[in-house]
Image: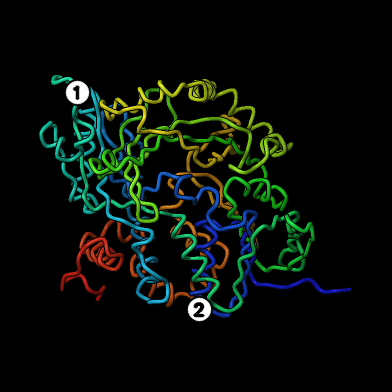
Amino acid sequence: MAHNEAVDVVLVGAGIMSATLAVLLKELDPAIKLEVVELMDSGAAESSNPWNNAGTGHAGLCELNYTPQAADGTVDIKKAVHINTQFEVSKQFWSYLTKKGTFGSCKSFISPVPHLSFVQGDSGVSFLKSRFNVLSKHHAFADMEYTEDKAKMAEWMPLMMPGRSPDEVLAATRVMNGTDVNFGALTNQLLKHLTSAPDAQVKYCKRVTGLKRNNGGWTVSIKDVNSGNTREVDAKFVFLGAGGAALPLLQASGIEESKGFGGFPISGQWLRCDNPEVVKHHQAKVYSQAAVGSPPMSVPHLDTRVVDGSKSLLFGPYAGFTTKFLKHGSFMDLPLSVRAGNIGPMLSVAKNNMDLTKYLVSEVMQSMEQRLDSLRRFYPEAKAEDWRLEVAGQRVQIIKKDPKKGGVLQFGTELVAAKDGSLAALLGASPGASVTVSIMLELIEKCFPNKASGEWAAKLAEIFPAREKVLETDAALYRKINAHNNVALELVEASNETESYA
């Protein structure tokens, strides 16, 4: 009987998560043998594609849902600070790769774009002022500016101010050192870098059809979608980083930790403008507040996007509903994910989230004119002929068991790992891509604990001079790391003080 092929690691999905983990593992152990398996015919074809995500370097600078306000008016900044330092960890990894000289240009995937928050009405202004007062005292947000001056706002966001009533109550904050990230370009750059090393392969048009435990690892059945041929690969470790498809694969693994998880797919749409006469007047990412009763992922924003050297504007998101788990998936994805172990949590979520269901139905039923009305809250003089509808990627939000409610719907990311560390899956969505590196470091510490604290420790310390916890509390170190990353990634000009960590 023929022996199966054997590798150390199989990674399912050629998006930003798998590409990051694969390159990181190769840096830590150049002898590791790994294979990335992708259903589509190219990398970053689903959620990592630049038109399938908002492309913001999520750093908590402008996203108002990361700083919730309590009933007594206090603003909690913990999540914003944590996401900011996670993004700095991502920038450390990209800086390290860029300095190697063989990775390619950072300009292909990251560009400086200011991040603004914009609010309307007395309650919005009161909230933004409170948020600014708390955030600007933290070293990660010390450069934030606040204004209620409409002349100043016209400088910051010239596209958005003409056509407004003179008595409209408005406020804005701005951070100049925000970024736009093309995660599709970054993913493909990572994959190209990966395959230049020995014993690292990326195989396209391949579907994982089975996961079976073997002696201390997994046998992965892989089907070629063109020829129909199936091969089996033995792997010591399997990572399921296939976006919405990670949940069915996690369920197929049968690991105890997968029990009780369900998925709630939400699709997205954007209005897109490529008219250079319009685009040149808006060089920013401007986030506002979600409508009352709307879910966190519906926070409206008008974004400068830089894709393959060209600038466009995106406005949205407009939510939608489909039973597909991937943009190129099957309408049977959701029904086929129902199991005895997750039907209870899924029914609880359905019962307790009727408002969300109504919201999604209303979003799906919107006309183009209604979508343009939402845009005109941001950009009063928007012309219909400058904008077209763009269908974004699928987001499969996590449903998990809850002892009190039966089931809860989560709007974040969750790493699910087998007890023995032989398999891990990433579920969920935003802030997703921006904090990929932190999530993959968490995975390494969870699934390879002895190596992470042993033979890989020195290399990890070289790549990541400062992790999230210390960046949150050490202002001087944060400023040094941030300045170094911004120079290495060509986001700012170099100066003598910012040339090295030393």
Name the one closer to the observer, 211 or 114.
114
Measuring from the top left, give residue 236's x and y in whole percent.
67, 69
Disc 2 and disc 1 in contact, CB within 8 angstroms: no
Amino acid identity at mark 1: Arg
Q: Farthest right residue?
A: 1
Residue at x 23% of width, y 37% of height: 131
Disc 1: which residue: 164
Which mark identifies residue 243?
Answer: none
Tag 1, which secondary structure? loop
Sequence-first disc among 2 and 1: 1
Measuring from the top left, give residue 228's x and y in whole percent.
79, 57
Residue at x 24% of width, y 65% of height: 477
Residue at x 45% of width, y 33% of height: 389
Tag 2, which secondary structure? loop
Q: Quadrant of the C terminus?
A: bottom left
**Is residue 40 left or right of 83 when viewed as pictured?**
right
**Is residue 339 left or right of 353 when viewed as pictured?**
right
Measuring from the top left, give residue 446's x and y in whole percent.
54, 61
Residue 126 sits above or below residue 435 on the image: above
Q: Quadrant of the N terminus?
A: bottom right
Disc 2: which residue: 455
Q: Residues within 10 Å of mark 2 (few under 14, many from 20)?
A: few
Residue at x 45% of width, y 31% of height: 318
Name the one closer to the observer, 466 or 44.
44
Q: Residues within 10 Å of mark 1 (few under 14, many from 20)?
A: some
